[in-house]
Image (tube, rainbow, N blue to C red):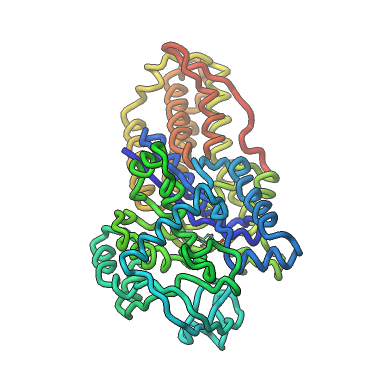
Amino acid sequence: MKFYITTAIDYANNSPHIGHALEKIQADVLARYHRNRKEKVFFLTGTDEHGTKNLRAAQSLKMDTQNFVDKIAEDFKSLKKLLNLSWDKFIRTTDRENHWHGVFKLWRALKQNGDIYKRSYQGLYCVGCEAFLTEKDLVNGKCPDHLKEPEIIEEENYFFRLSEYGNRIKEKILNDEIKIVPAGRKHEILSLINGGLEDISVSRSRERAPWGIPVPDDDTQTIYVWIDALPNYLTGIGFGRDNKESREQFHEFWPVDVHLIGKDILKFHALIWPAILMSIELPLPKSIYTHGWITVNGQKMSKTIGNVISPGDLAVKYGTDAVRYYLLREIPSTEDGDFSEEKFKERYNGELANGLGNFTARVLTLASKNYPEILATEIDNPEENLWQKIKETEKNIDKKINEFKLHEALIAIWDLIRFGDIYVNDAKPWENPQNKKREIANLVCILKNIAKFISPFLPQVSDIILSNIKKSGNVYKISKGENIFPRI
Ligand code: MSP
């Protein structure tokens, strides 16, 4: 079994914020979950470094564009350690060797089968979206997402025959061959198709858009940034590289199992991307998971407001797993959600320090003090009702993860923690521990399973707990360990 998961590749115009982090952490949970099931996993992420948006950001700092995007790409890469992300590859669209060849190959294939043609065009371009908008999209003459008037642009461009593919895409989405999660978003896309799809422009004049991949055999044009970015999902696993290893990797992992993206870019992934793949006769993505947007104290994050939260700073201050927990638990996986430092501290103290942290400390203290070594058979064969509860929790977690309801999987795990708390309060093993070996072994069993269940979500804490319940031959050696979530 293989599992290939991708995230959006982030624009390299600014350092990462907690919205970018949310998506990467969600993808990391899925990658780790499938790895734990012994599947062969490939997790791809990266940065989208071409286009006017990135060029202007570099210019505003009077920096050389390549140096600027190099620096931002490093900021994004640093999240790997700071947030304990387990991606297998970080792709950059300015990487000629790993990315450009694949984009050229794709372009030539589209051109060869007649799906790319040239015509002149006038349109309203929003640099924030890196897309043409129609009058219908505007609110008071401005782009509703970026609150700026679009620029009027007239030039000769290459076009892609998206209009030819509407019916075929519709069928694939309707019958879940391309499964869009959540279902509400699927209907959104279907109604767009029903409204009719137009051909889209896939290049810009080189004069106006110099920062990009040149169109093969036409150096007056640059490939449109989205047509350069979407193929990262192919080039990231070797498409376009002419060696045996790359070819094998590509065949092993394509088609992708999950494209995980934000709601704002679903159109590109559910319409343009499948049409491109159909045109070059590659299998289609199996599913597209769409997450919502995160606000800060109810407001959109923006440099102007000055409320951009850096996930790295947060992780340094409160710890990696605390940040992962907040983002995964507070924000319903497919919906919008909010960040505030108060709510963060509330969840931290209530659910991490008093919840998981406290239960862990109680069990490890009781066991290490009274029974530092317990036979594996005693721990792994607990009372029937307890075993039932653990199995039920496991089933529930599997279901929730497969439905992309990561917050609900966490609710199920915290319900098991509560069950453990009630069990220890009822059993009161501290009163006469010499007669309570069975109860203490049961508690270690609950904790060990909790550690196993949290491992995709809070990998560091899971490892710490399991390192205090170490199997050696046919016994578990239990140590007290450190306080995993000191109160803040
Ligand atoms: N470069 C394109 C994606 C190309 S994918 C082939 C892009 N970049 S982005 O930097 O603007 O956004 C990257 C991802 O971060 C998107 O999935 C987007 O939805 C997500 N988010 C950006 N801001 C966000 C929040 N405030 N909250 C949650 N996710 C957000 O789009």
Relative image position of residue 416 (x, y in whole percent) = 43, 39
Relative image position of residue 28 (x, y in whole percent) = 48, 45
Q: Is residue 488 left or right of residue 219?
A: right
Look at the picture and state if 474 lies above or below 385: above
Relative image position of residue 420 (x, y in whole percent) = 46, 35
**Residue shown at 48% from the left, 79% from the top:** 156
Viewer can see residue 7: yes
**Residue shown at 51% from the left, 57% from the top:** 331
Viewer can see residue 397: no
**Residue shown at 44% from the left, 11% from the top:** 473
Count numbered badges in the picture. 0
Q: Quadrant of the C terminus?
A: top right
Farthest top residue in view: 473
| Residue nearest the observer in this picture, 251 or 191 | 251
| Residue nearest the observer in this picture, 451 or 148 | 148
| Residue nearest the observer in this picture, 176 or 245 | 245
Look at the picture and state if 297 lies above or below 392: below
Q: Quadrant of the N terminus?
A: top left
Relative image position of residue 121 (x, y in whole percent) = 47, 83
Look at the picture and state if 243 lies above or below 374: below
